[in-house]
Image: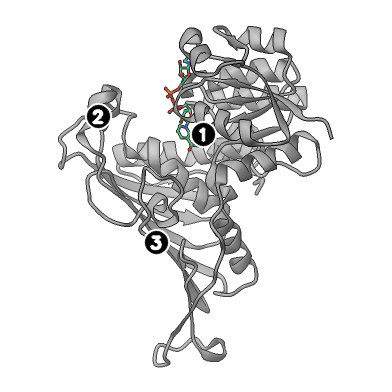
Amino acid sequence: MTKIRIGVIGAGLIGRKHLRKLAEHGDYELAGIADVNAEQVAAEQPGARVFADYRKLLDEARPEAVIIASPNQLHAENGIACARAGIHILIEKPVTDTLETAAGLIAEVRKAGIRSLVGHHRRHHRQVKALKALLGEGRIGDVVGVSAIWATHKPADYFKAAPWRSQAGGGPILINLIHEIDFLRFAVGEIVAVEAIAANRQRGFAVEDTAAALLEFENGALGTFFLSDCAVTPWTMEQGLGEAPEFPFSGQSSYRLMGRRGAIEFPSLDQWTQEGGAQDWNRPIQAQANHAASIDPYVAQLDHFRDVVRGVTPSLQPVEDGARSLLVTLAIAEAATARRRIDLRERYAALGQGGQTTT
Ligand SMILES: NC(=O)c1ccc[n+]([C@@H]2O[C@H](COP(=O)([O-])OP(=O)(O)OC[C@H]3O[C@@H](n4cnc5c(N)ncnc54)[C@H](O)[C@@H]3O)[C@@H](O)[C@H]2O)c1
């Protein structure tokens, strides 16, 4: 089968990772790279066609598909240009920076009929797929609730290197929580209402360092989320999965999913049930191990995108769905400021999706 000619817009931290994975992948051929730092990128990527203007990449190299790994504020513009040129997109998370720009991108993607995949790479982990399968088999019955933690300590250098990270919008709600929200929507179901509180008492920055959110799912489940970037713990999904060497493996579960007939910890997939499916607090409860091998989610994401581009499989996350994860995360930030419950149903409808879910 012929290789997919692919371009990359933005060769920064994640763009370079995509370029490394593409170089090792047998089903892609690099058509070119666009980055405003064209000279530096050309020096780093010998043999690649590098353009300073992303429109030249689209017009001159004519890729069949593009990975958009530019800053958030450029995702919509880049995505719309690809759609108008009939080029399929793998667009990094968050799908765009605001709901308005997301709605514009969704409209253009639909109009052009291109295929899209949002880069919430966690969806491609085998452990995530195994969890979905276990829940789908009814191993723990209907999900009653979720208790979740994402808590780690970002070093001082992280804030020194990029001062915007200590300003409003640069905190763990918009940077880190969006991955967790996307995971919860994918695994448990659509989130229909949120409440939240946030604090900056530990670091004293303008932006939050710690937050707590309450989640209400469409299927009736309730959830709590504790989030902090100034607490030393083994409970982040990065550490639990060991998905990247820069976040050393802890193997600990940061999620507890509780159902009518049992509970599952994630990512360990340890399952707790009573004999014979009993539901009785006086009976003993036993743990059962489930196993799913670790894989590189970025490679699995490229495998999936290849099949999406070739029309072999529907996208696991088209732009419409990525916009929903953005919508929930923005609402949590807003709820923390406004100190009130926010119902999301009307907002989903306003996004132009008629209340449909795509997962
Ligand atoms: N899925 C993940 O695991 C993951 C991880 C990190 C970042 N991201 C997302 O990827 C995107 C990029 O993040 P990053 O950390 O790589 O940022 P970065 O700042 O390291 O890289 C961005 C790159 O885009 C280039 N750029 C800026 N303006 C441009 C323009 N007009 N045209 C072309 N290139 C331009 C910059 O020169 C830079 O090389 C963000 O949306 C981020 O949220 C995803």
Q: Amino acid at mark 1?
A: Lys
| Residue 53, horizontal then vertical, whole percent | 57, 7
| Residue 61, horizontal then vertical, whole percent | 71, 12
How many numbered marks, from 0 up? 3
Foreground label between 3 and 1: 3
In the image, 161 versus 131, the foreground residue is 161
For label 2, count other residues whose C-alpha is less than 10 Å away and answer few (under 14), some (14-19) or many (20+): some
Q: Quadrant of residue 6?
A: top right
For label 3, count other residues whose C-alpha is less than 10 Å away and answer few (under 14), some (14-19) or many (20+): some
Q: Residue at x 25, y 37 (%)?
A: 208
Q: Amino acid at mark 2?
A: Phe
Q: Is mark 1 within 8 Å of ligand 1?
A: yes
Position of 173 compared to 160: left or right?
A: right
Could you tell me if the residues under marks 3 and 2 are in contact, i.e. CB atoms within 8 Å? Answer: no
Using the numbered discs, state the Cα–Cα distance from disc 3 to disc 2 in whole angstroms. Answer: 27 Å
Q: Is residue 190 visible?
A: no
148 w.r.t. 102: above or below: below
Q: Earlier in the sequence, mark 2 or mark 1?
A: 1
Q: Earlier in the sequence, mark 3 or mark 1?
A: 1
Q: Earlier in the sequence, mark 3 or mark 2?
A: 2
In the image, 247 versus 163, the foreground residue is 247
Q: Is mark 2 within 8 Å of ligand 1?
A: no
Image disc number at residue 251:
3
Foreground label between 2 and 1: 2
> Which residue is identified by label 1?
93
> Which residue is identified by label 2?
159
Q: Residue at x 62, y 24 (%)?
A: 105
